[in-house]
Amino acid sequence: MKRIIVGNWKMNMDLKQTATLITRLRTQITNPTAKVVVCPSFVSLVQASEIISSQKALLELGAQNINDNDEGAFTGEVSGPMLKGLVGYVIVGHSERRIVFMESNELIARKVAACIRNKLTPILCVGENTNERQEGLAKRTVLDQLEQNLSEIIPSEASKLIIAYEPVWAIGTGVNAEPYDVEEMALAIYHYLVNKYGTETADKIPLLYGGSTNGDNAASYLAINKIGGLLVGGASLNYKVFSSICQL
Ligand code: 13P
């Protein structure tokens, strides 16, 4: 399976900065070893898509959020049908949405279903917080999130998922998870998926790692058994660093 490197730009980059960053990535990423996905803000997606096609950039697009409904009176929200054709991927269940926007596991399950219904690949993020890790509850937390977040999809849809393990305590903190801890979690997630969907399907679901990844540590995470790519936050805003990660 080809590696996947995803850049989550979060709430950064206005239109002009988006155009500059995409153009720079286009010139740097000429020989990617991975499928490369960037996730700008909603308002920049149309422009980003136009630049990617006109410059034939080796980039794909993702959104950072989706509403669980397809249409209706939901002021300020963006739906699957609006994203379909514009992006191929949607980040769902990011810890910032779980914590800052209080998204429940039930809502996240409906967002995963909205992605599948609209032929968008959900990048489902799961991860424990500091207390949960210190209390030895990391695996239980992550597997419980998966169980709840995957409750609205049927087994034949599972091969369309991407799962990202992002320990909350490693996001934007510069605190690096130890590769053996990441491997332990990746194996736990993989075995969970094997039990739930069977080996053939589990083998088709890419597992990404995210949390303070950068040009110095990316290779060590990519070398981990069962880790098939990265979900990069801050470092994805630096075109030199992000391009280098995509060409490791
Ligand atoms: P950082 O790489 O900035 O820690 O962010 C990770 C992340 O949240 C990606 O979704």
Image: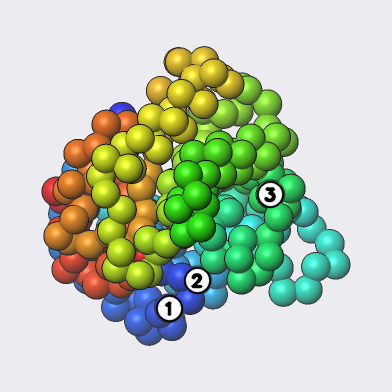
Give the residue type that dot 1 points to.
Asn
In the figure, 123 relative to 176: above or below? above
Instruction: Tell us which disc is closer to us: 3 or 1.
Output: 3
Instruction: Tell us which disc is closer to us: 1 or 2.
Output: 1
In the figure, 19 relative to 227: above or below? below
Residue 5 lies, in percent from the top left, at 31, 50
The reply to whether the C-beta atoms of the residues labelled 1 and 2 are less than 8 Å apart is yes
Residue drawn at (37%, 44%) of the image: 208
Q: How many marks?
A: 3
Q: Which residue is mark 2?
A: 41
Residue drawn at (23%, 62%) of the image: 214
Residue 183 lies, in percent from the top left, at 31, 37
Q: Please give the label number shown on residue 214.
A: none
Looking at the rendered structure, the secondary structure element under dot 3 is helix
Report how far apart the C-alphas of labels 3 and 1 lie in the structure.
26 Å
Q: Is mark 2 within 8 Å of ligand 1?
A: no
Q: Mark 1, residues whose alpha carbon is within 10 Å: few (<14), some, or many (≥20)?
A: few
Quick check: which quadrant has ligand 1? bottom left
Which quarter of the rendered picture does the N terminus lie within?
A: top left
Q: Which residue is mark 1?
A: 12
